[in-house]
Image: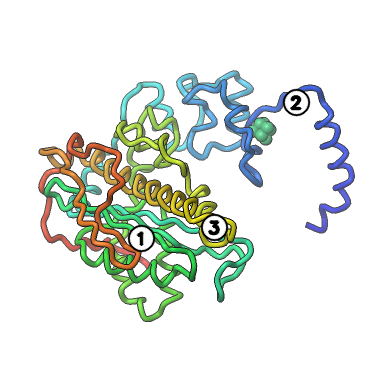
Amino acid sequence: MIHLLPTMPERIREMHAVLRLPEAPDIRPSHHCSKPYDCEFWQRCTSDKPKDWVFYIPRILSASFDRLERSDVVSMRDVPAYFRLTRTQQRVVDAAKSGKVYRSRELTDLLQPLAPPASYLDFETFSPAIPVYVNTRPYQRIPFQWSLHHDDGSGSLIHADFLAKGETDPRRGFSETLLSVCEQFPGAMMVWSHFEEKVIRDMFELFPDLAERFTALLDRVVDLLRIVRSHVAHPDFNGSYSMKSVAPAVAPEVTYGDLDIADGGGASAAFYRIAADPTLSPEARDGLRRSLLKYCQRDTLALARVHQWLSQGVTKISAPFGAEISSNSERDQVKVGSDIMPFDLSTLPVLGTGRSGSNYRRPNRSR
Ligand code: SF4
């Protein structure tokens, strides 16, 4: 940082000059818009771009993006055949051009061991700059919520979740409830990204007395995003493999528009207020808690539906999901079943009966 100090007066002069302009400068949105932080004007600046804008080609380099834009190539459908792309990028561009879904030949074999019984897991964490709990450091990742959907292959989804109250360090409660619930359900534990695995490893380090149980859980965790990114391209993903792009493309009934909390950042901010805002009224706190529960539950339901869609052609679709099992057996802060279910699950298709009593274990796991 210190080396930047001599340049600051000039930079500040430039910023003031921009602020004095009668109109916003004509700057092309590009990779600089998210470095070092996401610019809040992104939606505004990209509102005229097509859904398959070449910027959304996964992991496209700045130089490649610049070359395409200099050639007036804005849509993926117009990317010339000779333009060099990675294999994954090429699949995404091909899907945009053809309008067809790509599934690799290996996908069937990869999904076979993941047939129900299987579970879908999502965590929320926050990383306060000023620590809220004793024995935590600035920006330390603190998990405070999990949601799990379980598909036993019989046509019903079971839902369980945990949301800390925020008054005390939530990590022990998070860990114990997570382990207890996961140990009740056989099969793979599917997640979307390696984030959940990182959090489990944090808890593994923090609580040596739970290490053996966390090791058993890690053995069952499967990152479905990794499989999808390498083996599937869908024209309606528009180059993005975020759950918010993938789920609505393959399961249109799964939407996020009705949620007060739209992403992980919003969930972190909401929990920070619950944990650290003394001015928060009990009503506002309850509202934030309801929004958090709804958001996290939607993510695991979305994951269940994406897995179901992927498995079409792998496992016979035979019956709709029944209603969620809703025992409402509140135990501490864990709730099994749910009263927050905006979808009519009876309209959803379901995987075939699958295996019963499977105890999935991911092969070749390195620790
Ligand atoms: S999104 Fe922000 S950084 Fe990017 S061009 Fe627009 S105003 Fe500039």
Label 3 to label 1: alpha-carbon separation:
16 Å
Q: Is residue 219 above or below residue 101?
A: below
Which secondary structure lies at badge 2? loop
311 and 265: which is toward the camera: 265
Tag of residue 162: 1
Q: Quadrant of residue 356?
A: bottom left
Would you say the beta carbon of the disc 1 residue lies within 8 angstroms of ligand 1? no
Residue 331, percent from left and from top: 28, 66
Residue type for callout 3: Tyr
Which secondary structure lies at badge 1? strand
Q: Is residue 142 above or below residue 239?
A: below
Q: Mark 3 highlights which residue? A: 272
Local packing at callout 3 (Cα closer than 10 Å; few below 14, some 14-19, many 20+) is: some
Q: Residue at x 37, y 54 (%)?
A: 122
Residue 124, percent from left and from top: 44, 56
Q: Residue furthest bottom?
A: 209
Residue type for callout 1: Phe
Tag of residue 25: 2
For ligand 1, the image quadrant comes to top right
Q: Earlier in the sequence, mark 1 or mark 2?
A: 2
